[in-house]
């Protein structure tokens, strides 16, 4: 994923922290 695109959830960040790929506030999009 392109981390420079503000419309794309930060999947890489969540994968690194061991959490869900999509944070709750992105699920509504």
Image (cartoon, rainbow, N blue to C red):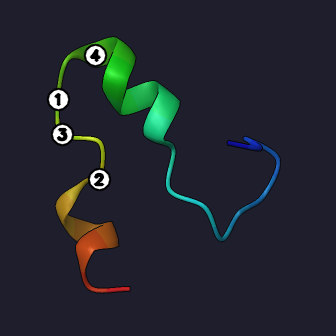
The residue under the point 50% across, 28% down is 12
The quadrant the C terminus occupies is bottom left
Horizontal arrangement in the rendering, residue 15 relative to residue 24 (left or right): right
**Residue ID for mark 2:** 22
**Residue ID for mark 4:** 17
Tags 3 and 1 in contact by the CB under 8 Å rule? yes
What percent of the width, then of the height, locates residue 18?
A: 20, 17
Tags 1 and 4 in contact by the CB under 8 Å rule? yes
Q: Is residue 19 above or below residue 20?
A: above
Tags 3 and 2 in contact by the CB under 8 Å rule? yes
**Residue 27 position by quadrant:** bottom left
Horizontal arrangement in the rendering, residue 19 relative to residue 25 (left or right): left
The residue under the point 37% across, 14% down is 16
How far apart in space, not on screen, are marks 1 and 2 (Cα)? 8 Å
How far apart in space, not on screen, are marks 1 and 4 (Cα)? 6 Å
**Residue ID for mark 1:** 19
Disc 3 secondary structure class? loop
What percent of the width, then of the height, locates residue 20?
A: 18, 39
**Residue 24 position by quadrant:** bottom left
Residue 20, which numbered label? 3
Disc 4 secondary structure class? helix
């Amino acid at each position: 994923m392109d981390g420079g695109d503000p419309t794309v959830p930060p999947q890489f960040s969540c994968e690194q922290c061991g959490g869900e790929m999509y944070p709750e506030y992105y699920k509504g999009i």
